[in-house]
Amino acid sequence: MSNSETTYLTWPQIARLGLVQASLGSIVVLTTSLLNRVMVVELALPAILPGALVALHYFIQLIRPRMGFGSDQTRRASPWIRGGILVLASGGVLAAASTVLLDTSIGLGIALATVAFLMIGIGVSSSGTALLVLLAKRVEPKKKAAAATCVWLMMIFGFAFTASVSGKFLTPFTFERLLIISSTVSLIAVVVTFLAIWGMESPVSKAQNAIRNADEAELGTASAKASFREAFTEVWKESRVRSFTWFVFVSMLAYSSQDLILEPFAAVAFGFSPAETTTLSGLQNGGVLVGMLALAFITSKAKSQSLTTLSNWTIGGCLASALAMLGLVLSGPIANVLFFKITVFLLGIFNGAFSIAAIGSMMQFASVGSARREGVRMGIWGASQAMAFGLGGIIGTGLSDIARIVLGDPASAYAFVFFLEGVLFVMAAYLSFQTRVQKPANELSKHLVGV
């Protein structure tokens, strides 16, 4: 379908899709944080158990390309969003039930939790991938960064609101309350998602069917009826897809690896109390919010939005993040608390800016290349991101432990890991540049077609 026939989403419609992301986040935050704490504290189980379950929910998201392929084949994202949220909600309820079961039977509880977290990963893969594909196809190019900011802020809101409200209703804690709250959150998330997606994709008219049939005839039946393996191979041959996949993995690995070691570093290097490290985390997240909003505002006000614009912001954000990581390395020898806090805030700003620019680029690049493969591309990149987040915490904490043994000083060990993360950000900037220069702009313009 030509660009003139594409109906772009309005801001209210984009906000509605943000509610879908908030619903996904509300279920995920209960399973990855609250249940984590219950298993370790109330049930006194080894921390490796919830850690392995969370990692499992990330690694199963390697199926995202298959989910995206399904969306490509049906040409509609809504069924995959609705189906995904149902699977995710069911997994959320089963995860809470498994926590209750762990109190009486460890074996059965672990078995049920494994099934639950697999369902959570599958549900997120289906809904999350289809949601991004819908945004990629239906958001005006110059609004993509702002739309990504809107949707991601709604997800963060879902995290914060669910954690805050559920925490109040969980006092005093009982397993029955935990199960009721999890079931309620899951039910609300399903209802909100179904209402938010309602009418977002209108039924296909006879005229649209005729256009699609003509397009399929032009593309060839082999392309239209390709299997997932053939579609994946076809997409993976595109050098841009491969470069951007590596960029997503490396940048998200650098982004996520510092999550679990920044607060311990503040404690050993500056003597921060638990309350002070919590405030530090809030400072960093505040910077992320500023970076996201600033980039969304700048790009939405730009007169034009080429494929290279967001790429430039992505490269700049990665390089600035690398400088901020270097600032963390130097903050130990400088031993100035104010310098350290400013560096953390700047790191948040640069991380927020680069992540939104990267998501906006992802939404733009999804439509560049062989026709009707947006879902497969988005799935590949989503799987790469999930893998990076699954490995990030393990690698960050593992490297810091190894460096502590070698260097003998905890602060120096954390600083060494920060340095490596800075190197990863520089590598990510290079990979982003490589992605941008894969094809000449005039060749790319031929593919910027709405579907």
Image (spheres, rainbow, N blue to C red):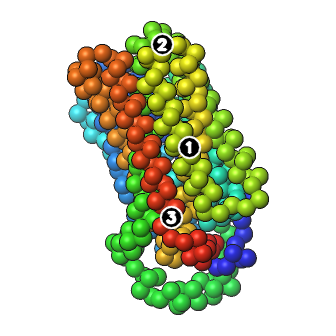
**Amino acid carrying mark 2 in the image:** Ala
Specify which label sits upstream in the sequence, 3 or 2.
Answer: 2
Q: Where in the figure is residue 11, as x and y percent of width and height?
A: 75, 54
Does residue 377 appear to the left or right of 309 in the view shown?
A: left
Residue under pointer 3: 437
- Residue at left 59%, top 89%? 214
Residue under pointer 1: 317
Q: Where in the figure is residue 269, as x and y percent of width and height?
A: 42, 14
- Residue at left 48%, top 13%? 335
Q: Where in the figure is residue 180, as x and y percent of width and height?
A: 51, 31
Specify which label sits upstream in the sequence, 2 or 1.
Answer: 1
Alpha-carbon distance for marks 2 and 1? 26 Å
Alpha-carbon distance for marks 3 and 2? 42 Å
**Amino acid carrying mark 3 in the image:** Val
Alpha-carbon distance for marks 1 and 3? 18 Å
Q: Where in the figure is residue 195, as x and y percent of width and height?
A: 66, 53
Q: In which quadrant of the rendered view does residue 383 lie?
A: bottom left
**260 versus 141 height, above or below:** above
**Amino acid carrying mark 1 in the image:** Gly
Q: In which quadrant of the rendered view does residue 295 lie?
A: top right
- Residue at left 68%, top 85%? 207
Mark 1 nearby-residue class (10 Å; few <14, some 14–19, many ≥20): many
Identify the disc placed on residue 335.
2
Give the secondary structure at mark 3: loop
